[in-house]
Structures are given as structure tokens and as C-alpha cells.
């Protein structure tokens, strides 16, 4: 149920972002033009309240509001007098916000069960960097709209090749650190999850990168979108499958 609540909160936050007018979306996602945005906002409210209620039953309160508030600040910002605070605009700022928001949300949720603060920090680090990498990958196909809107994403400022090299280095460093953390017993030996994460990270940042930059990426691009969007789901399915097969192979003793 906590996983479901997390999914509902994620859906609510991103639906709000799409429902609010964004200059770059007029170019990057022209298919949204003319859509009935009030329906999206209603769906956003319903899913947010449902996710919040589920988390509240586990005595987790702030986790549901944290991404929702940051999502609104990111999309619209706030204005105090002549000062307007908006989280869009700085180079890589959007990616950092996305990474910290969801990495922080996950860390807040799992801190309820984590026995050590180092476990929480390790998981926060893992998802924060993973989400930073994934968000930058998606910026590759939004370069045109982001450039027109003046949003300084890393692909816009650094170019494709340099961005790819940076992401590959981050992926290698992240999983090297996770191996060390695992050896120090701060996290459980989730070899399947970490191995699949490494495979997806290296594949996504090194292969088929040109196919992913266009609006209609074809089979290779869609395959990589599935790898990125469904990474955690696929990793959990693989993990459960391997555990199930392993348990079946162990002889039963009366």
C-alpha cells in the first residue's frame, strides 16, 4: 500500500505540472494543446488525497506534501512583492530539483523502517543520483522546447556528447559507492536491484542515445523509455522471480 501511495503522489505531482501552462510544453508536448486541464486537476486532487490518506495510516505525513509543494514551486513559483521565486531556469536546476524531491520523498518514507541513519542516507543518495541521471536523459528529447523557453538544461548548455560522458561517470561512481555501502552492511545485499540498475544506467547513457532525442524515437527509443520508466518495477519483478525460483529449488525437510 505504501508503494501504491508513492505512485499516486508521483502521478498527482506530474499531472499538476502538465495541467499548468508551461511555455516549453507548447513545443515539446504539442499533443496536450486543447486538452481539458480542469479534468487533470481534479484527477490530481483525488490521487493526491488518496496517496496522503494511505501514508497517514502508516503515520507518514510530510512525505506526501513535500513533492507536491516543490512541484508547484517548480511549475509556477511564488511571488513576494517584486521578488519571484521559481525553480526553473538555472543550468541543471530542474534536474537537481527532481532528484532531491523524489530522493528525499523516498528517504522520508523508508526512514520509518530504517534502523540506521546511514541506511536512509544511502538510499537517499542512490535514488537522488539515479533520478538526476534519468531526468537529464529525458531532457535530450526536449532540447528544442527548452531552448525556446530559455530553460538551461544540461543538454542545452553542454551538448549531447559531454552530457552523455557526465552521466556515464555518475552512473559508475554511484554503483561503486553502493558496492562499498553494501559491504559496510548499511543496506541489504540487493544484488538483483543494483545489477539491473547498473545495466539500465550504462545502456541508457551509452547506447541508442540519438534514437532517444527525437519526439518519435522508434523501437530503440521506446525500449529505452520502458527501461527507464519501469526500472524499479522490472527490478522488483526480477527480484521476486529469482527469490521464488530459489525457494522452490531448496529441498523441503519435514
Image (cartoon, rainbow, N blue to C red):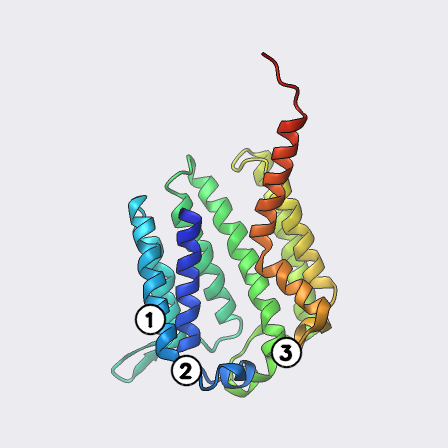
| Residue at image point 64% right, 37% down | 242
Can you name the residue that lies furthest to the top here? Answer: 254
The residue tagged 3 is 215
Q: Quick one: label 3 or label 2, which is nearer the N terminus?
A: 2
Checking the image for residue 21, the label placed there is 2
| Residue 165, x across and y down, in percent | 70, 65
x%, y% of residue 228? 61, 60
Tell me the element at label 3: loop
Residue drawn at (37%, 41%) of the image: 112
Alpha carbons under labels 3 and 2: distance apart: 20 Å
Q: Earlier in the sequence, mark 1 or mark 3?
A: 1
Q: Is residue 24 visible?
A: no
Mark 2 and mark 1: Cα distance apart in space = 16 Å
Give how far across and how far down residue 35 sits, in percent.
44, 82
**Which residue, given by chain and number where applicable, does mark 1 sit on?**
42
Mark 2 vs 1, N-terminal side: 2
Give the camera-side residue of 138 and 81: 138
Amino acid at each position: 500500500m505504501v508503494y501504491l501511495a508513492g505512485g499516486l503522489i508521483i502521478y498527482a505531482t506530474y499531472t499538476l505540472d502538465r495541467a499548468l501552462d508551461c511555455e516549453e510544453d507548447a513545443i515539446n508536448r504539442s499533443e496536450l494543446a486543447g486538452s481539458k486541464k480542469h479534468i487533470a486537476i481534479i484527477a490530481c486532487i483525488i490521487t493526491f488525497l488518496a496517496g496522503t490518506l494511505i501514508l497517514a495510516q502508516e503515520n507518514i505525513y510530510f512525505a506526501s506534501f513535500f513533492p507536491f509543494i516543490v512541484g508547484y514551486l517548480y511549475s509556477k513559483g511564488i511571488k513576494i512583492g517584486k521578488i519571484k521565486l521559481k525553480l526553473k531556469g538555472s543550468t541543471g536546476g530542474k534536474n537537481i530539483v527532481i532528484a532531491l524531491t523524489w530522493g528525499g520523498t523516498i528517504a522520508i518514507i523508508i526512514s520509518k523502517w530504517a534502523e540506521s541513519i546511514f541506511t536512509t542516507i544511502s538510499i537517499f543518495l542512490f535514488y537522488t543520483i539515479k533520478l538526476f541521471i534519468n531526468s537529464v536523459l529525458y531532457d535530450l528529447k526536449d532540447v528544442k522546447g527548452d531552448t525556446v523557453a530559455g530553460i538551461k538544461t544540461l543538454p542545452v548548455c553542454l551538448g549531447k556528447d559531454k552530457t552523455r560522458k557526465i552521466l556515464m561517470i555518475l552512473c559508475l561512481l554511484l554503483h561503486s559507492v553502493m558496492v562499498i555501502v553494501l559491504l559496510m552492511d548499511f543496506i541489504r545485499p540487493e544484488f538483483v536491484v543494483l545489477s539491473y540498475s547498473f545495466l539500465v544506467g550504462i545502456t541508457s547513457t551509452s547506447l541508442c542515445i540519438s534514437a532517444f532525442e527525437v519526439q518519435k524515437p522508434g523501437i530503440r527509443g521506446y525500449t529505452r523509455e520502458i527501461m527507464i520508466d519501469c526500472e524499479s518495477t522490472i527490478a522488483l519483478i526480477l527480484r521476486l522471480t529469482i527469490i521464488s525460483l530459489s525457494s522452490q529449488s531448496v529441498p523441503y525437510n519435514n
